[in-house]
Image (cartoon, rainbow, N blue to C red):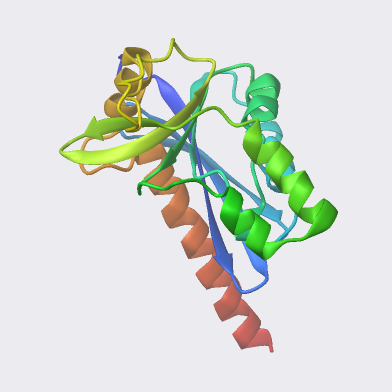
Amino acid sequence: MKPGTRALGVAESTVEDHCLFCGAVVRADRAVDGVSFASATVGGLDATDAVLRLLDRLDRDDVRYLLVSGVAPAWFNVLDLDRVAAAADRPVLALSYEASPGLAPAIERAFEGEAAAERLAVYDRLPPRRRLRVNDETVFVRSVGLGGEAADPGDGSTPTASDDVARVIRAYTPSGGRPEPVRVARLAARGAQAWRAADADRHG
């Protein structure tokens, strides 16, 4: 991958009742090339809209990939990856960092009736998670719009990610298991939340 190839990393920070998303444009050579923010509702259904606002505000035709941290931020505000990919018109890769049997039981415990059904409908449409080794760490990736799926091992374990997905994730992950665009977005979201809290205290 060329050093100047750009990806948009998306991550959030939730503090009490406030969720803040950050989108960070980062090149494959680790240069940061743009940042934007958007809020979402804790326990709501507007995380997808927040990500789409990041895309609109940044308005970057040179971004090749979207790398998203997690699929159910801010207390199960589930992301619709197909909708994000359609709006962005480029591949979307959502990463998580721990093995999991799935979020459906947790959603059913946290919500009832229509609120649970709405979240489960979005969650059930998500592509499957695929396992990937990166710098001696294991991450899990859901992908829309990039490459084919690797073969299922047939033993009940999580299938591995396709070669195309692995190439993109590894290109943006110089160390550890968290791709640089996502790491930068996460740091910026946390920093903005800390500033918001300090500013509120100062004017409170």
Residue depicted at 65% across the width and 25% down the height: 82
Residue 201 shows in this picture = yes
In the picture, measured across the screen, residue 7 lies left or right of residue 133, that is right
Q: Is residue 198 depicted above or below 113 in this figure? A: below
- Residue 24: x and y in percent read 49, 40
| Res 136 quadrant in image | top left
| Of the pair 163 and 186, the residue shown nearer to us | 163
* Res 122 → quadrant: top right
Residue in the picture at 70% in, 27% down: 83
For the residue pair 48 and 107, the one nearer the viewer reads as 107
Question: Closest to the observer: 154 or 183?
Answer: 154
Looking at the image, the residue that sits furthest to the left is 136
Q: Residue at x 47, y 63 (%)?
A: 191
Q: Position of residue 90 (x, y in %)?
A: 57, 17
Question: In the current view of this chain or complex, which residue is farthest to the bottom?
Answer: 204
Q: Residue 31: which quarter of the image? A: top left
Outermost front residue: 155
The foreground one among 143 and 89 is 143
Left or right of 87? Residue 179 is left
Residue 45 in sight = no
Whether residue 118 sits left or right of residue 201 in the image: it is right
Quadrant housing the C terminus: bottom right
Residue farthest along the right direction in this orientation: 114
At 62% across and 74% down in the image, what residue appears?
A: 16
Q: Position of residue 34 (x, y in %)?
A: 51, 38
Image coords of residue 57 (percent x, y): 69, 37
